[in-house]
Image: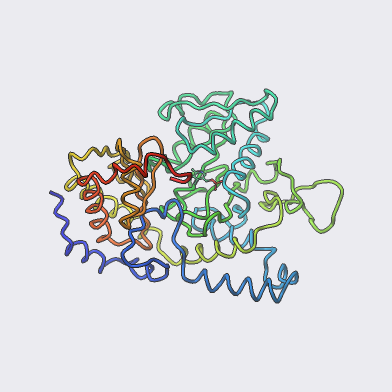
Amino acid sequence: MSGWSRAALEALDRDDPLARFRAGFQLREGLLYLDGNSLGALPQRTMSRLEQTVRGEWGEGLITSWLGAEWITAPRRVGDKIAALLGAAPGEVIVADSTSVNLFKAITAALSLRPERGVILSEAGNFPTDVYMMQGIAAFSGGRVRAETVAPEAVLARLDSDVAVLVLTQVHYKSGAVRDMAAVTRRAHEAGALVVWDLSHSAGALPVDLNGADADFAVGCGYKFLNGGPGAPAYIFVAQRHQAAAMPVLSGWMGHAEPFAFEDDYRPAAGIERFLCGTPSVLAMTALECGIDLMAEADMAAIRAKSLALGRVFMDLMDEQCAGLGFTLVSPRDDAQRGSQIAYAHPHGYGIMQALKERGLIGDFRAPDVLRFGLTPLYLRYADMLDAVSLIREVCEARAWDDPRWKVRAAVT
Ligand SMILES: *Cc1c(COP(=O)(O)O)cnc(C)c1O
C-alpha cells in the first residue's frame, strides 16, 4: 500500500511553493495534462503579449520594429535568459531554428574543431533526429566522417582517438533516464572528443549546469518544459572557449560579422551570433520569451523537488492500483537517475493512451509500446496523480484499449 489518500495529496498541494503558477496557464478544469514534456501548456500572458506584438509591433510599427521593438536583438536577449536556466554565461546561448537544425550546426562546428578525427558517436535508441542528423552529415562528408551508434552502456568504452564528437541526450526522451553530464563530458575530454548535449527534456525540468560540467556544445527545444508554443524556436549553446574557432557551416547572413554591410564574402560574427543563420521568427520568439520569463520566476530547486515527488507519488499509486494489469516501469525508480516523466511499457500501450485521451488524461505513446506521462511541476497537482492513475486502472479493467478505432495508428502519437 502506498497510503496516498486524496486528503494527503491535497495537503501537499496546499503546501506546494509552486502552486501559484497553475493559474498562469490556460488549462481547463478536469483535464489531466501529462504531456507538457512534449508540448508545454499555454501561459496566459502569451496571448496578450502576442496580440500586442501582432497589432502594435507588426501592424503599427511595421519594419521599424526590428529596432523599435528590439526584434533584431531577440535571439541574443532570449538566449541570455535561457543561459541563466542552464548554468551558462550571457553570450553562450542563442535562440534560432529548430533543435534538429541546431544539432547540425553544433555537430559540424565540433567537427571543425577536431579535423583529424572522423567519428560522430551516439547511443542506440537516442532521439531519432539526433542520429538522423549525424547520418546526414556523414553522408554529405563523402566518406571523411562516419556516424556510429553503440549500446547506451558501451558509449564510454567506445571513446578512442577516432571519435571527434559524442552526441547524447541528457534526459532520455523515452525512459526519462538522466545521464551524468559532468562525468560523461570529463570522460569524453580525456579521450580528446567533444560533446554535444541535447537538453530537450532537461531545460525547465531540472537544474542544468553546462559550465559546471565543462560542456562544449548543447541544443534544446523551446516548446516542451519551456512552454514556448508549438514549434517554438530552439537554442544552441557554444562554450565561450570554442566560439572563436568553431566554424559555422550554415553560414547565413544573420551570423555574419556585419549583416547590413552586405559584403560579398562571409565573415562570422565574433561571438555566439555566428550561430544565427537567417531572419528570426519574431512571433514565435515572442511566445517563447513569455514561457522563459515565466519559468525564470520559479525556483529551479523547487521545480526539481516537486517533479521528483510527483514521480514517486505516481509510481506508488501505479504499484498499488495497477499491479497485475500488464505495466512494466521503464523509467528509473531512483530519483537521482530520473528526469521529469514516468514511462511504462504495456503490450496495449497505444490503445490505452487513446482510451485515456477520450477520458481527459493526455499523455503520449512512443513506439513500440511505451506510454509516457510528463510531469510539469508548474501546473500539475499532487491530487492529479491520483485522478490519472485511477483512470489508467479504469481503462485497463474495462479493456477500453480494445477498440477497432485504434487498430490504425494516428500520424502523431
Ligand atoms: C523533442 C526533441 C527534439 C525535437 O527536435 P525538433 O527539431 O524540434 O523537432 C530533439 N531532440 C530531442 C531529444 C527531443 O526530445
Residue 138 picture location, percent across and down: 63, 28
Residue farthest to the right? 264
Residue farthest to the front? 404
* Foreground of the two, 211 or 218: 218
Compared with 91, 400 (above or below) is above
In the picture provided, is 146 more to the left or to the right than 157? Answer: right
Count how many numbered circles sit on residues in the image. 0
**Residue name at image x 45 percent, y 48 percent:** 201
* Foreground of the two, 211 or 162: 162
Residue 374 picture location, percent across and down: 37, 51
In the picture provided, is 396 more to the left or to the right than 103? Answer: left
Residue 59 picture location, percent across and down: 69, 74
* Quadrant, the C terminus: top left
Residue 367 picture location, percent across and down: 41, 37
Residue 337 seen by the camera: no
Residue 396 seen by the camera: yes
Q: Quadrant of residue 94?
A: bottom right
Q: Quadrant of residue 232?
A: bottom right
Protein image colouring: rainbow
Compared with 353, 51 (above or below) is below
**Residue name at image x 52 percent, y 56 percent:** 230
* Foreground of the two, 302 or 243: 302
